[in-house]
Every structure is written in C-alpha cells, then in structure tokens.
Amino acid sequence: MRYLSTRGTAPVLDFRGATLAGLASDGGLYIPEAWPTLTEAEIAGLAGLSYADTAVRVMQPFVGDALTPEELSDLCHRAYGRFSHAAVTPLVQLDHDQWLLELFHGPTLAFKDVALQLLGLFFERFLTGTDKRLTIVGATSGDTGSAAIDAVAGREGIDIFMLHPAGRVSDVQRRQMTTVLAPNVHNIAIEGDFDQAQALVKTMFATPALADRFALSAVNSINWARLMAQVVYYFYAAVRLGAPGRRIAFSVPTGNFGDVFAGYVAHRMGLPVERLVVATNVNDILHRALSSGDYSKGTVEQTATPSMDIQVSSNFERLLFDLGGRDGAAMAAQMAGFERSGAMRLTNAQSQGASGLFSSARVDADDMALAMRWACEHAGQVIDPHTAIALSAARALEVDVPVVTLATAHPAKFRDAVERATGVRPSLPGRIGDLFEREERYVTLPATLDAVGAYVAQHATPSA
Ligand SMILES: *Cc1c(COP(=O)(O)O)cnc(C)c1O
C-alpha cells in the first residue's frame, strides 16, 4: 500500500515510511492511495474472531508488505494482551437499540491506548536492526500524554519527552505520566499553559539543531497508523450487532476528528454504516462545518470534556481531501487560505459528500449532565463526560438501526465531573488503584525554547 500526502507534494511512502514520518513534509497528512475493501463474505467471516485477530484482517491491506501476516498478528496480540477486558472493546447494551462501545480498558483508561499501544510496537519493530533512533516530543493536556508514555516506556531506540502545563492537568492525569520511571521517559512540567507548551513543541520541530539531530517525531493523531488501528473497533462492534446483514450507526465524541474519521474509513472499506454522528461540546467548529459549511475557528472555551476543547481539527483535512476529489494542489490552497484567515467554506462536493454519511450535534453542559444521569438511572452505567456528549447526540438521532456510542474514557479519569452530575464518585480500577502511592519523577522548566531545547539535547540520543 502506498501513502500520499493530502497536499500533493511530499514523497509517496509505504506503510513503514508513513508510520515513522507522522506529518508529511509538505504540511499535509498521509492517506492511503486507495481504500481497500472487504467483501460481504469477508466481513461476515469476522464473526467470532477475537479482537486481535479482527485487527489483523482489517489492517493487513493497509500494512501491505511492511510486515508479514505473522509479524502483524504477533504485534496485535501483544498490544491487545495488555487490555484488562478479554473482549478488549466490549459492547454494553443501554436500551432497546442504544449501545456503548467501551474503549477504555487499556493501561491508561482512555481510547487512545487502542491505537498507541500498537503504534509503540510498530515504532520499535521498524527501528530494530537499523541504526536509527526516534525522539518523540509532545505536549499534552491529558490523555494523549499518558497513553503515549505507556506505549513506548522501555522500548528500544525511542526516547519520549512529554510537556504538560504545570498545575493544569488533573492529579490522576499527571500521575499517570510522572510515575512511569523507565529511563527513556522524560516528563517536563512547563511553567505556562497548554498553548505555550504546544507552541514550544512546534518551535522545536522547526529548529533543525534539534529536529534533524534527534529525529524528532510526533504521536498526535496526524499519524496514519493511529487512525488505522481505530478502524478495527468499528468492524468488531458492527459484526457483533449483525453486520453485514444489518446497518449500524455510531455516535463519536469528537475533538481532532481522528476517531470518527476511522469510522469513515470503515465505511469506505465496505462496512454498512448507516450514520456517523460527530458530537462536539460547545467548541463546535465541526458542527458548524458539517451543518452549514462554515469552518472557522473561534476561541477555545474550557469545559468538563478537555479532550474535545479544540479550535482546529487536524484530521478533518483527510476527509475534505477524500471528498473533494483527492486534488492535492486544491487542498493545499484551501488550507493555506484557512491558515491565513482562520476561516474557510467547504466546497459543494465536500458538503454534499459529508451530508450523505455524517450528522453532527453540539451538546452543552446541561445536556451532557442529563445524559450521564440517564445512563446511570436508566441503565446502571456510570459514564465519563466525553462519552455523555456522544450519548446525548445518539439519543437524539432518528434511525431504526442499532446506535453505538463510543465510550472514550473511563469515568474514574474525570471523577469530579461525574460526581457533580450523578452523585456517584467512580473509583480507580484495581490495576492503577495504587497510583497515589507511586513515586513521581519530572522536571519543571520555564516555557522557553532555551530551557526546554537544552534539556532535550542533554537527555536525548542523537540519531545516526
Ligand atoms: C482524544 C479524545 C477524544 C477526541 O478524539 P478525536 O480523535 O481527537 O476526535 C474524545 N474523548 C476522549 C476521552 C479523548 O481522550
């Protein structure tokens, strides 16, 4: 399988190259040259397979020759063997046709583990036997940082530097990062806010003395391999609910548009998806784009669903590229306009293409709390605020097929918000129950390139 950039000029790469590159060198995102499809019989043949075996069938066409089927199978079994539920992503029934797909049984209790556990193994596999190293640098406001750290802790050939805004992530989120003591993990608390931490990371990538010397790499959801890993659970859930004989709808709490784009890929591969609901909080750029064609950024409002508090959804570009006729030059021009003015209109082809499959909803704090209470009182399920945003949208959807809400975080990760809405304070699951007794390790640095760049240069290993 070959991968192209959405902006048309970066080199075409194979799966290994696209995985290691992350962002394309022309500023675009890598996307497969064509969508592989599974026939109805092949989809029916997924029934009864374990999660890891389903993952191998769904991902093999994207991986191509980069790994043998045996190698891919080995990595999938290792990645998903670390989940605490035997089904990896179990379905829970809430109502006659309302379901939850629990994606939070990984080591750090959010759905990001599903993709990052595998990505860590891909990185290690592709670096082994080369003299190359990778230095992962990221900024996190919560879930991505802990999932990425857990995925690469102790792996050969990789260092990870994770910046978080000092004092502005929850105690659970900080401890999930800072209690990982593997020597290749470097946590940095930045004296500043998340935007300053993220700006520092961008500056480091644009500083050749750091970026080239240490082979800096990103693990945010622009990496194709992450999206690919997320396609799997759409197949896994739909087949259990009767696909390919029955159509299924999904409601997805959305920030960067990575998770719901994976649902779009599943649809393009032949899964009978009735609807994909893009559920946003009051930071509703995607709801405005999909309902009126207006993609324009405002200022971010802080909410109880921090992982959806975004201004710009980086993966939306992949959808616009695919719906807009896969014209890299036109996409580059459209995005250049957006980067200049902070606003753009979707073309007719993009709007019409999206409306056939996507619905969208903007869910405010009151409706989020209502959904949490409904799940608790009606179905005995305590759900996290992000999941509640999508469940609220799912319940408003008028379809006569099963509707699956993606449950993206364990409620214990957001205990205060859950307790405010439901009166129930969820406890940490047994496997991380001792989080508050573990030793922490991190440094605190000022939000300057001098300080952080010097720290990275001192602790990372140059790439050959
Ligand atoms: C990251 C995240 C989201 C948003 O997912 P995207 O792929 O960025 O749209 C939703 N919920 C939780 C809990 C998350 O951590």
Image (tube, rainbow, N blue to C red):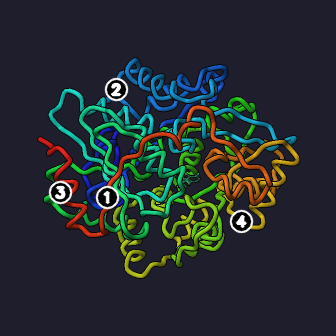
**Amino acid type, mark 4:** Val
User: Which SS class for mark 1?
Assistant: loop
Q: Which residue is mark 4?
A: 363
What is the spatial separation of the Cα atoms under label 2 and label 1, in whole angstroms?
Answer: 26 Å
Q: Is residue 130 left or right of residue 36?
A: left
**Amino acid type, mark 2:** Leu
What is the spatial separation of the Cα atoms under label 2 and label 4, in whole angstroms?
Answer: 42 Å
Which of disc 1 and disc 4 is earlier in sequence?
Answer: 1
Rendered location of residue 301, percent (x, y): 58, 73
Q: Which residue is mark 3?
A: 210
**Amino acid type, mark 3:** Leu
What is the spatial separation of the Cα atoms under label 3 and label 1, in whole angstroms?
Answer: 27 Å
Q: Residue at x 39, y 77 (%)?
A: 337
Which of disc 2 and disc 3 is earlier in sequence?
Answer: 2
Q: Quadrant of the N terminus?
A: top left
Q: Residue at x 28, y 38 (%)?
A: 183
Mark 3 in CB contact with mark 4 (< 8 angstroms)? no
User: Which SS class for mark 2?
Assistant: loop
The numbered disc on residue 8 is: 1
Determine crowd level at label 4: few under 14, some 14-19, many 20+ residues with C-alpha closer than 10 A.
Answer: many
Determine crowd level at label 1: few under 14, some 14-19, many 20+ residues with C-alpha closer than 10 A.
Answer: many
- Figure quadrant of residue 9: bottom left
Q: Which residue is mark 2?
A: 67
Which of disc 4 and disc 3 is earlier in sequence?
Answer: 3
